[in-house]
Image (cartoon, rainbow, N blue to C red):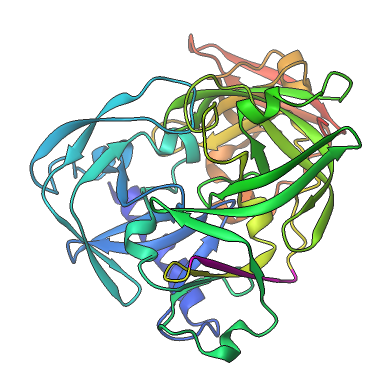
Amino acid sequence: MKKLLCFIGLFLALFALKSHAGIPGGTIPFIFDSHLYLQVRLNDTIPVTVIYDTGADFLYLDEDYLKLNNLQNAFGKKGIARMGGAGNNEPQSVDIFIEPVKIHCGELDYQNKITPVIKLRDILGKHTDGLLGNTHLLNMPLEINFSESYIKQLKEPLPADSLDRYHKLEARFKENRIDVKANLQIDSANTVEGWFRMDLGSGSTITLSNETTSALNLAGVRKAYFETQAGGIGGSSEEFELRAEKFCMVDTLENLVIDCSLNKKGALSSGRPYVGIIGNEIWSLYDIILDPVHSSVWVKRNNNEGSYSRSSITHMAVIDRTDICDGWIINGLYKGGIAEQAGIEIGDIIIAINDRPVKEITWEEQRKGLGLNGKTEYTIKKRNGEIVTCVLYIRNQII
């Protein structure tokens, strides 16, 4: 418990530094690490780190966060509900708190009517205690400033000068979700045009639905197949990556890595009112104003370079679970990649990299990137408890 309290103190300190770094008053600072991490307070006293997810509705809390902090019964009576998500599994039964929970976020106060408990850290790692959706944050115009890392609710009507140098996208707001019109050109034979869903809960670039993917002629296009046990709230996920020539939403991005879903169920399967989703690798290139009153989305290109044209060099996906074990869990692999060839499997735990325990690697270091290159030794704990060494020769991106 002492170690956990120290972690919470460190996290609060990070947000305190941000709040004094020239950010305007009345804002909600965030830390960007593929997702927007906000510090909120529940029922006046409980600090919680949540991500803002425009693909969700209200407040959701992580199951392990509650267990590790002895908060399983802190928010009153419980019930049971069934939930689906972006993953490939059927809707699952989850606990829900059925008594109202007070949320204090920045200078704003809300009340959450029901609060589902989900396995969020299995997807995003130990720094995520919960997520916050549109119901609370998007009830008035909202500025999402990736240049300065803050969110701010704006007054209605918007002052004319607040939209200086912003470009208005063709957008629609429906059932608490946001869609924008965009055009994706994979190659000369494959173009996708239509409504794309804005999903700040996705850390990717563009992800096409299975239905959209199936309608394309991609037989001759180079692909990298990827499987994960944590593709979303709905569980496992299958997809392949490829390189697309151009994506245009307001300006044109070239040579970007995109995902194509192979899921038969969930939010990326079939019968959806959108052709795909746009994640934070794209949205972080812009400062954004969302105006739900007038169904408007405004964007302004910022100075962020982004990493939309880069793919994995380790050919695997990992999450930091040093809150519950000694390392980082492998939760995704690319078929035929160097990680799979070295004998690494989904569910393995990385204990050390080049003899350095991963418990010593801070979140800040992880966010900046470890700069791994060439021969790299991973100390791995297998599912049966055996400790092995896997050697990866890190050189090329997977696609």
Outermost residue toward the top? 384
The image quarter in which residue 12 lies: bottom left
Q: Is residue 20 above or below residue 336?
A: below
Viewport quadrant of the C terminus: top right
The picture quadrant where one finds residue 243 is top right
Residue 240 point in image, percent of width and height: 71, 26
> Residue 62's spot in the image, x, y percent?
33, 41
Query: Could you say where residue 304 lies in the image, as x and y percent from the top left?
Result: 73, 65
Quarter where residue 348 is shown:
top right
Where residue 41 sits in the image (x, y, percent)?
27, 63
- Examine the rendering and report whether any part of residue 166 can be seen: yes
Q: Is residue 11 above or below residue 118?
A: below
In the rendered structure, does residue 347 fall within the stretch colored magenta?
no
Residues rendered magenta in the picture: 295-303
Front residue of 182 and 261: 182
11 or 359: which is nearer to us? 11
Q: Is 299 colored magenta in this rendering? A: yes
Residue at position x 45%, y 25% in the image: 235
Q: Residue furthest left?
A: 77
Q: Is residue 102 left or right of residue 41?
A: left
Q: Is residue 205 visible?
A: no
For this view, does 6 lie left or right of residue 304? left
Residue 279, relative to residue 161: is it above or below? Answer: above
Count of marks, rendered view? 0
Task: Please give left or right for residue 195 compared with residue 53 in the image.
Answer: right
Q: State the residue in front, 211 or 126.
A: 211
Residue drawn 89% across the image and 21% down it: 220
Q: What's the magenta bit mostly, secondary-structure-wise?
A: strand
